[in-house]
Image (cartoon, helix red, strand yellow):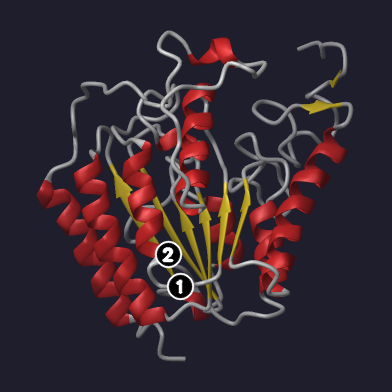
């Protein structure tokens, strides 16, 4: 395919090896863009290490699919991994929670042989759904065995199901692992109406999950992630920011912004409820949790 203006030909030598092309095209300025994203997350983690804040937010980037030497799934560099490495200078037990609708494969891969970083990913998991990894039996390797947990749900999961299982799993992990700091990836593609996702979740459900973590008074970093319904992703991240800062939001979207028309037809912060078929059964979700609980015991998580 011929590269368009400003875009480097994705069939150039080396593009296959390094993941450039397809969903990670090369373009003039991509290095500076990736460096800014990585720098923002690393700066956020550094602020927390220096005790300058209890909670730091960076809604840009959060490229959880990028691998050590390969771009993947719209992610050019894994800023989350680089940020966690900054946190490691101060903290010995780091909990990473991934709320994006896709498995946080790049972050798990980076830390799946260590006990120092516990990765916990909640994501849709069905045949053909990207990236295809993250089943509940997938729990890390070697010395890190047991220190990766995946909760793979099917499409149509509802808020009451998600919050119930999130609370059960996350509370158990925090109690068992005793993390000193927590990083949460808040991908907006988990919100109902996302063109790439398939969940029936709304900002209030995910905010309830974040507040469950906040009750443990850990230093916290909140990061963005995917989100392909841009108006809803903006609504979601705005609502999280307000909740964390304990601010009330007006229902109406302010009209003095360049993207006002994107929020039609109702121009409010609310996301329209959708009817969706739920493919999750209690039996299936309970089976996942039972496997997770069994692994936590089997690998004696938190005993180091
Ligand atoms: Zn995603």
Q: Residue at x 71, y 38 (%)?
A: 19
The CB of the residue at mark 2 lies under 8 Å from ligand 1: no
CB atoms of marks 1 and 2 within 8 Å: yes
Query: In front: 202, or 89?
Result: 202
| Label 2 packing within 10 angstroms: few (<14), some (14-19), many (20+) | some
Residue farthest toward the left in the current orientation of the protein: 283
Secondary structure, mark 1, is loop
In the rendered image, residue 156, in percent from the top left (x then y), is placed at 25, 32
Determine which residue is flagged by label 1.
217
| Label 1 packing within 10 angstroms: few (<14), some (14-19), many (20+) | few
- Decide: is 115 above or below 193: below
- Decide: is 250 above or below 110: above
Q: Residue at x 20, y 47 (%)?
A: 161
In the rendered image, residue 139, in percent from the top left (x then y), is placed at 40, 66
The CB of the residue at mark 1 lies under 8 Å from ligand 1: no
- In which quadrant will I find the N terminus? top right
Q: Kindly report the distance in space between the C-alpha atoms of the residues bearing marks 1 and 2.
A: 5 Å
Query: In front: 257, or 207?
Result: 257
Q: Is residue 130 visible?
A: no
- Decide: is 239 above or below 116: above
Q: Is residue 144 left or right of residue 285?
A: right
Determine which residue is flagged by label 2.
214
Q: Is residue 189 left or right of residue 164?
A: right
Query: In front: 23, or 80?
Result: 80
Q: Residue at x 52, y 37 (%)?
A: 238
Q: Residue at x 28, y 66 (%)?
A: 292
In the rendered image, residue 67, in percent from the top left (x then y), is placed at 66, 51
Q: Is residue 72 left or right of residue 150?
A: right
């Amino acid at each position: 395919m011929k590269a368009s203006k400003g875009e480097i030909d994705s069939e150039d030598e080396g593009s296959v090896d390094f993941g450039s092309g397809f969903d990670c095209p090369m373009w003039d300025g991509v290095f500076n863009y990736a460096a800014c994203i990585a720098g923002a997350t690393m700066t956020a983690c550094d602020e927390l290490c220096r005790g300058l804040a209890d909670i730091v937010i960076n809604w840009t980037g959060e490229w959880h699919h990028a691998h050590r030497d390969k771009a993947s799934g719209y992610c050019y560099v894994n800023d989350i991994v680089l940020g966690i490495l900054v946190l490691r200078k101060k903290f010995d037990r780091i909990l990473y929670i991934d709320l994006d609708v896709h498995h946080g494969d790049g972050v798990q891969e980076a830390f799946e042989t260590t006990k120092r970083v516990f990765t916990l990913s909640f994501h849709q998991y069905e045949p053909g759904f990207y990236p295809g990894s993250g089943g509940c039996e997938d729990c890390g390797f070697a010395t890190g065995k047991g220190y990766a947990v995946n909760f793979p749900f099917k499409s149509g999961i509802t808020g009451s199901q998600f919050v119930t299982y999130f609370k059960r799993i996350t509370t158990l992990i925090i109690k068992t692992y005793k993390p000193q700091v927590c990083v949460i990836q808040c991908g907006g593609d988990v919100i109902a109406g996302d063109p790439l996702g398939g969940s029936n979740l709304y900002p209030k459900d995910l905010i309830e999950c974040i507040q469950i973590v906040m009750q443990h008074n850990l230093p916290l970093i909140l990061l963005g992630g995917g989100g392909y319904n841009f108006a809803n992703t903006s609504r979601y991240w705005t609502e999280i920011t307000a909740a964390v800062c304990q601010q009330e939001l007006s229902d109406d979207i302010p009209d003095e912004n360049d993207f006002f028309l994107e929020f039609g037809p109702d121009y409010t912060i609310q996301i329209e409820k959708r009817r969706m078929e739920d493919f999750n059964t209690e039996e299936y979700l309970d089976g996942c949790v039972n496997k997770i609980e069994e692994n936590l015991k089997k690998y004696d998580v938190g005993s180091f």
